[in-house]
Image (spheres, helix red, strand yellow):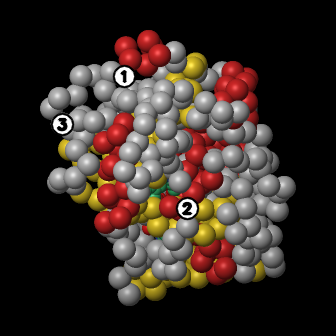
Amino acid sequence: MAKTYDGIIIGAGVMGASCAMHLASAGLKNLLVLEKGPGVGFGSTGKSSACIRQTYSNYEVCLMAYESLQYFKNWQEFTGLKEPRADFNMCGVIFLMDADDANVHKIMEIQKRAGVLSKLLDHDERRTLFPDVDFCSTLLDLEAEDHECTYKLQVLYESEGGFADPVGTTQDMLDVALGLGARVQFKTRVTGVLSAGGRVSGLDTDFNGVKETFHAPLVINCAGPWAMGMNDAAGVPLREKLVPTRNQIVCKRFPEQLKGTIPMVADMVNGVYFRNDPTGTQIVLGSAKEEDEQEFVPDPDNYNEVADAPFRDEKLTILNHRISTFQARGEITSYSGIYTVNQDDYHPIIDESELKGFYPVCGFSGHGFKLSPVVGMLVAQQVLGQWGRGKTDVPSDFFKRNRQKLGSNWGGVMA
Ligand SMILES: Cc1cc2nc3c(=O)[nH]c(=O)nc-3n(C[C@H](O)[C@H](O)[C@H](O)COP(=O)(O)OP(=O)(O)OC[C@H]3O[C@@H](n4cnc5c(N)ncnc54)[C@H](O)[C@@H]3O)c2cc1C
């Protein structure tokens, strides 16, 4: 006999876990999370750099990042878990921007309004806080023989930013939901969406070849790069253009000669970002260039999961110029993950679809992780008219489908 639930979430990535935590906290009983992987974080989340910064080009998303950061800072209190795993590392964030980049002042105004602690660092402050970083403002031309360093950068500093453990964060939020009576079933792929009378009524699934149907009047689609397929299966494709794209990362061991700590660095001049890792032994290096977010992944279950040699060489050369003790060559590891880029405006859709009870929560591009603690709150408010854990001032209809494009200056990585 088919099993019946009050609500089902597709996907145990960071968004599915957040939705589960908030919906269960807001009182939704009999909640099921279905995940095709053998555990949490088998999609974009497991590959996430999980950088947490509050530099955004519009107020609402900046506020969402700010609010989420308060939860990351007080994670144990937020989750109520005795031994949470999220492991937030508040190493600070610096955005390196061209001297002529007029965005800085607009961003700082937005940040001030949202409550974010940020400031522009002068030359002495830069040297004192981050002695290893070279603040050269000349674009590094990898083809040119000469490079003349100039020092006219604007350095925007968020003292409270950093990064967290993406899989630990996800597991924590899911554990909260499980503690409140929700269930999770791994290795279970959703294969079809059922509906009756204009309302979602359940899901067909496959567990190691065993087919099963689950009934529910509520389905939250948190399937990350696979979410568009689920929207199609429900017969409600989004008008927004959501595209799975490959995103490459390089990791390199820390040299012994470093003098100080390394913040999370977003180098908007050369188009890279990098950060420390929780063990303090390696740097995680990715791209902040829109052109590196364009490689369409037709099948998110099957793509090239290592970084390409030209990508590795370019990014390591830039890293070496910023922190000379990191050699531009030598031993590295690399991997690729998938962004779900909303090519319309780089921001997610969190909304009920035309099929009643079916909610797409997808299209987070390259910046969803840091927003995740608040995402489930917005969903709980939309679905139940109740807050889950905590409360947000981000308007719950801000991420509606069919909206006018939201402002975005920097593409999917920075939005
Ligand atoms: C390389 C990389 C670096 C990033 N860096 C940052 C960063 O520094 N800061 C930041 O804020 N964000 C970052 N992001 C973005 C962020 O990680 C994502 O926005 C976020 O993880 C998306 O979470 P999700 O839960 O929506 O998707 P996913 O994590 O992809 O979760 C979806 C889940 O659904 C499951 N699923 C899919 N289809 C089905 C099905 N049919 N049946 C059952 N289960 C299914 C999948 O197995 C998966 O576990 C990065 C992403 C990548 C790839």
Along the polypeptide, which appears first: circle 2 or circle 1?
A: 1
Q: Which mark is residue 250?
A: none
Instruction: Name the one closer to the observer, 341 or 167.
Output: 341
For the residues bearing labels 2 and 1, Cβ distance under 8 angstroms? no
Which residue does the numbered mark 1 point to in the structure image?
Answer: 130
Which residue does the numbered mark 3 point to in the structure image?
Answer: 255
Q: Hey, what amino acid is under mark 3?
A: Pro
Q: Hey, what amino acid is under mark 2?
A: Glu
**Few, some or many C-alpha atoms within 10 Å of disc 1 (few <14, some 14-19, many ≥20)?**
some
Residue 256, horizontal then vertical, whole percent: 15, 32
Residue at image position (22%, 44%) is: 327
Q: CA distance from mark 2 to mark 1?
A: 29 Å
For the residues bearing labels 2 and 3, Cβ distance under 8 angstroms? no
Along the polypeptide, which appears first: circle 2 or circle 3?
A: 3
**Few, some or many C-alpha atoms within 10 Å of disc 3 (few <14, some 14-19, many ≥20)?**
few
Q: Which mark is residue 291?
A: 2
Q: Hey, what amino acid is under mark 1?
A: Phe
Q: Is residue 312 above or below residue 387?
A: below
Q: Quadrant of residue 86?
A: top left
Residue at image position (72%, 75%) is: 237
Residue 247, horizontal then vertical, whole percent: 45, 61
Task: Kindly tell me whether residue 198 is visible in this rendering.
Answer: yes
Residue 270 as seen in the image, left or right of residue 304: right
Q: CA distance from mark 2 to mark 3?
A: 30 Å
